Image (spheres, rainbow, N blue to C red):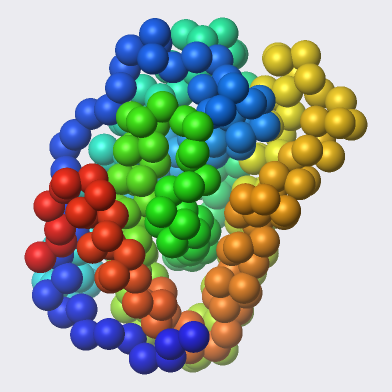
Amino acid sequence: MATQVPNLADHAIPIRNIQFNRDPGLHPRWWHSGDPVPTAFFNALSCTFPEGEKFFMDSVRYYRDAVPEELRAQIKGFVGQEAVHSREHAAFNELATQSGYDVAPLEGRAKRYLGFGRKRSRIEQLAATVSLEHFTAILAHALLAANSRDLDGAPQDAVRLWTWHAMEEIEHKAVAYDTFLHVTRDWSGLRRYLLRMRAMILATIMLFIAIGGNMGDSYRQDGVSNLKTWLRTIGYMIGSPGVLRRIFLPYLDYFRPGFHPWQHDDRALLSRAQHMLAMPAAA
């Protein structure tokens, strides 16, 4: 793995105000391959995004007047991208509602956990955002590195939605982290590291409970909440396509002292995704 951070002083974070499919006729209940398992996984993830993105925006935006101008510009791009993500995933979740799911318990679970986070100090909220942004970045890397094959069998507009989201998560993957480094610049390295680790451990526990709980809600609504389905879920997450298996080592890298998100230079992946989607690149 790379250990040097590339020079990204001119790295722009473009705000692409685009919309994806809102036609329920193009979004069946088991929209991913006619299979409840991958459908439940992506729906479970999507139902965390509207509230999650708002939490991320609030925690980073709070510090925008306390950072250098260059980072302030990146925060503006970060907030703009996350706002569009929140809107588009709310629309995606509405498609799930129109296909027969009750997504309120799924979205409510994220709101409860993030409500707990909002009771913490501002710096703890920022540290939680840094941790969860690492999750989104490594999930995005896994998706783009596999040329979005995790979505084989999904409607093309869903493929575009998730590929676009992954691309932008990588574009802004270091904004919260760099904000955290700046506002804790007078801390000792140990104090900063311990907060970062504590936040990641809590974020990991809550995220796994949220995603697992959301998938369980979907299975119950589908009438397939049984041992066979959960064994298939384990195979899907760890075996093939195995998203948990593929993000395990990048996840552990976060625990390394001196870690920085751009030590993993994803610019080639970004270029490929931008070409695939025919969307403008970051400057």
Picture quarter containing residue 70? bottom left
Residue at x-position 55% and y-position 49%: 117
Along the viewing direction, whichever of 277 and 247 lies nearer the viewer: 277
Point out residue 212 in the picture as x, y percentages from the top left corner: 71, 39
Please indicate, yes or no, whether residue 122 appears anywhere in the rendered image. Answer: no
Q: Quadrant of the C terminus?
A: bottom left
278 up-or-down from 161: above or below: below
Point out residue 133 in the picture as x, y percentages from the top left corner: 45, 59
Picture quarter containing residue 265? bottom left
Residue at x-position 57% and y-position 78%: 253
199 up-or-down from 259: above or below: above
Along the viewing direction, whichever of 67 and 265 lies nearer the viewer: 265
Please indicate, yes or no, whether residue 241 appears anywhere in the rendered image. Answer: yes
Instruction: Determine whether, in the image, residue 239 is placed left or right of residue 250.
Output: right
Query: In the current view of this chain or complex, which residue is farthest to the right?
Result: 227
Along the viewing direction, whichever of 148 and 97 lies nearer the viewer: 148
Residue at x-position 34% and y-position 37%: 161
Residue at x-position 23% and y-position 63%: 271
